[in-house]
Amino acid sequence: MVLYLTSSFIPHQELGSYEKLEPLDSYGFFEDLRKEWPGPANFLYVPCNPKATEENEHQMKRVLDAFEFSKLPIKDTKVLDEKSSAKACVDWADVIYLAGGHAPTQLNFMKRVGLKSAIFDFGGIVIGLSSGAANAAYYVYHMPEREGEAMDPNFIRFTDGLDLTNIQIIPHKDYIQTLKVDGLSLVDDIIIPDSFGCKFYFISDESYFKAKDGRTIFKGKGEIIEDGLVTPLKQGAIVPFMGYVEQPVIKTLFSEGYDMVFCVEKNDKRCEVYYLNDDLRNLFVQTHLEYNEICEKLALTVVPEERASYLDQIRLPVIKREMNKRGDYVRTIHVDTPLGRRAKNIRVKEVPGYPDWYMVIYIDITTILDHDWMTDEYARTGFLDRANVFLDELTADDHYSLVYANVKGFKAVNELFGNQKGDMVIIQTRDALRKHLKPMLMGRLESDHFAVITADENLNEKNLKIMCRQVFKGESMEYTFEIHCGIYQINNPTIDIMQIIAGAKLAEKSLRISKRNMLFAYYDDSMKENYVKQRFLLSDFERALADNEFEPYYQPIVNAKTGKIVSAEMLIRWRHRDLGMVSPADFIPIIESEGKTSLLDKFMVERGIDFIEKCFTLGKRAVPCAINLSRVDFYDTAFIESLFEYIKRIEPAMVRFEVTESAYADLESKALEYLDKMKKHGINILLDDYGSGMSSLSMLETFDFDIIKLDIGFVRKIGINKKSESIIISTIKLAHAIGAKVTAEGVETEKQLKFLQDADCDYIQGYYFYKPLPEVSFENLLDSL
């Protein structure tokens, strides 16, 4: 079979009007189709609705016109209907056309006539247009098209299709992007939320996929929508294509956890790849590879400590030797995945009837380990399998939620009390979840993370508060710990379990950044929107950095007594090409969590030194500029060493580096040596956010900070909290006693300024004097003074 999946290649004409028109210029579609055309062809038209006679005649006439214009000869035509034998029609046909229309209506018709089994071993050309292309998939996505479908709880969006491809097409991109159904944006409110756990190919008219001999290519314009993210769809190979011949075998393999199946010719090492799972797709851009290439690509997934051994043991001579000696070959390796570390088997078998070939099977053996060894609850794979069964059996009258539970600060428990006590905390957490949530299903996903499906009646506030606060008692110790819970109410059991867990995890994660000291939170769509936005910003980060979308802003710092500008703090801003100005609160946390902060800090250092150098070169006024360094920076030795090269261009005293008190508390001896080295070069070091939570006099004892910056939380309590005022006064006196200056951040009122002046504070930073300014504005400000 040669399969073409198209959005549309025929010009749009309203029903009732007809003009013979040339087909659309579809990125070489007809030139490619001509190469596969069998000569004068028997053409089988599969309609959307066989009863819609006028609509079928209208569409078929335009399709046949397109073939005529493209010199693709048709010998005879048939229309599949309810009375026809699908098997007989398919056997007769050379070319099968799956028409466009209302996708659910068409798929129901296809199922009624048994087209799926009839087309299984078809050897000709299949062309799917619009809904016909969508329904060709193994797992079909039906977006709501008609009014009422988006709000209908019984509208089925995911179902099994003709099983010809694993590509889920959404056609007519340019039209659909502006479409609304039931008042909802079809793309933003429906398709993108539905994409979690799926990969949709959102393509424009004239675009198409071609699948032949286990290889799929794409021509045209489109996007991939996957897990809430939208990325460009590039022209070229789409790997892998799950061929129709392999479908029954592949489904069996997939259910057993197979990751990859391929055959290798023993002598010339050429390979044929029959199956790849989603996790390996990005490694392989084609399915016809040489054996060593496959091994090297798989090596990229193997944990580093096993990689060299794997490459040595997977060599074909080693395999031949063991096959000759024992009749089989098995090796176990480990890979790190989003699901955690997994155990993989590589197994080699002889191929009956093909003595020159080996079959190589790459399988995840972790999936057979259903239960967690410690808690006797389900492990991740066992929980996911059982949860899917549980969801399939839910009805509209059932009210259940998934609770994602996480022990707050569990790492500290192990460090303080040892692994044995840590294990006992895990057991106590399990018992608390069992007692208070009365779970229908429970699993330990990893470490201290549990997932529980429970009836909503168990989730009352009193019950949750009691459960979430635990006291662990040992022989001679007592430790209070908290269980943080994210709760996802299962209102739609057709949602994939991974999406439900992801939602509950987002809810639990929201507790970490909340200032309300909450123990549990319910998932809502705003969490997903924030998550999707953060992931989009992360994926766009390096592109934006290269395109100079990031800008340094300078907030002047003034002498508390004179009000004159004495320095400035550099702050980062992102002027996104599509979103406009993005708040640092939106992008800094996700960039920090992905360990990419050093890229931003390097940018700020370069821009700050460029600015200072420019001011000196032009004879303009310059003031010292303070740049924030994260704890991650100090473990990037190449970056830290580069700082000493940068400052050679200017007077070192013109650069200041700020380190937050929490970051300083985490630094190890090597990192602290870098701070000492900076001071010796004449760079001032500032301790930022002093008093924000981890303050310790030992910080001030172990390092000679030049400036201590009072946390904004203290400044805001001036005139409100006498204790805060006393702490400010004491901190300023202490700083002066050890030879450090003090900067107060966030000063906005005259009352705050007057108090700080009376307390002998050295420097003031805040909106009372200046807001953060773009570089040009700051330069002009300095020139005007």
Image: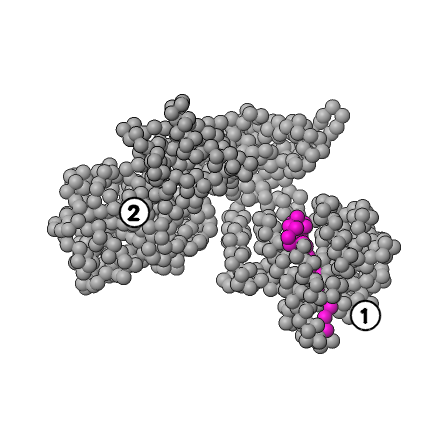
Q: Is residue 482 visible?
A: no
Q: Position of residue 103 (x, y in %)?
A: 30, 48
| Mark in the foreground, 1 or 2 | 2
Q: Is residue 676 left or right of residue 106?
A: right
Q: Position of residue 389 (x, y in %)?
A: 42, 31
Residue at image x 46%, y 29%? 331
Q: Is residue 320 left or right of residue 536?
A: left
Disc 2 is placed on an element classified as strand
As drawn, 655 above or below 139: below
Q: Is residue 646 visible?
A: yes
Sequence order check: which comes first, mark 1 or mark 2? 2
Residue at image x 30%, y 40%? 243
Residue at image x 34%, y 28%? 350
Residue 626 magenta: yes
Q: Which residue is mark 1?
A: 562
Q: Which residue is mark 2?
A: 211
Residue at the right extreme, as displayed? 737
Task: For label 2, count other residues whose C-alpha is less than 10 Å away and answer few (under 14), some (14-19) or many (20+).
Answer: many
Residue at the top extreme, as displayed? 326
Residue at image x 19%, y 54%? 60
> Which amino acid type corresponds to the residue marked 1 in the rendered image?
Thr
Split into 4 quadrants, where in the image is the N terminus?
Answer: top left
- In the image, the segment drawn in magenta is 621-640
Q: Position of residue 712 (x, y in %)?
A: 73, 56
